[in-house]
Image (cartoon, rainbow, N blue to C red):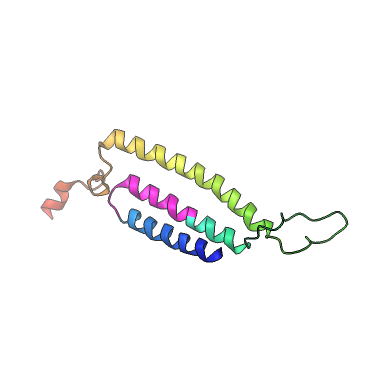
Amino acid sequence: MELMVAIMVGVLTAAAVHLMLARNVLRFLFGLILISNAANLTIFVAGRLTPQAPPLIPEGADAPIGDVANALPQALVLTAIVIGFGLFAFALTLVYRTYQNLGTLDSDEMRLAEPREAEDKA
């Protein structure tokens, strides 16, 4: 099971890098989300994948009985998903507002600070 997840993380990372190398800002944003999900899957798998029992501690015991998954990576991934969704919503809003102001999503054409005329004179 871990091998399949590792392959999936590799595919997600490769797709994310491919998207992040594009000039389109929206594609970059989707690549960022994909690489975030790949990192979340990596952390999740680090806590062990066990379908046998939930990671609950019985009353009077100090640790879970048997082979159970670690609950800490699951909590970290849950927190990372929430933070990642907030980041995605904020970045998507910024991209939309940028598109409204500039009329393009191509990062090479977003040159307010350095217009093309300055490039031609140099």
Q: Is residue 8 magenta?
A: no
Task: Name the residue nearer the viewer: 116 or 68.
Answer: 68
- Helix, strand or loop: magenta stretch: helix
Q: Which residues are magenta?
A: 22-37
Residue 117: x percent and y percent? Answer: 14, 47
Residue drawn 83% across the image and 61% down it: 62
Left or right of 33 in this view: 18: left
Left or right of 78 in this view: 58: right
Above or below — where is 64 with respect to 105?
below
Above or below — where is 119 with respect to 66?
above
Left or right of 33 in this view: 98: left
Residue furthest to the top in view is 100
Residue drawn 61% across the image and 54% down it: 76
Residue furthest to the bottom in view is 3
Q: Is residue 25 magenta?
A: yes
Residue 99: x percent and y percent? Answer: 30, 37
Left or right of 14 in this view: 57: right
Give the quarter of the image for residue 56.
Answer: bottom right
Residue furthest to the right in view is 60
Q: How many marks?
A: 0
Residue drawn 48% across the image and 44% down it: 87
Q: Quadrant of the C terminus?
A: bottom left
Residue 54: x percent and y percent? Answer: 71, 54
Above or below — where is 41 with respect to 81?
below
Residue drawn 50% across the image and 43% down it: 85
Q: Quadrant of the N terminus?
A: bottom right
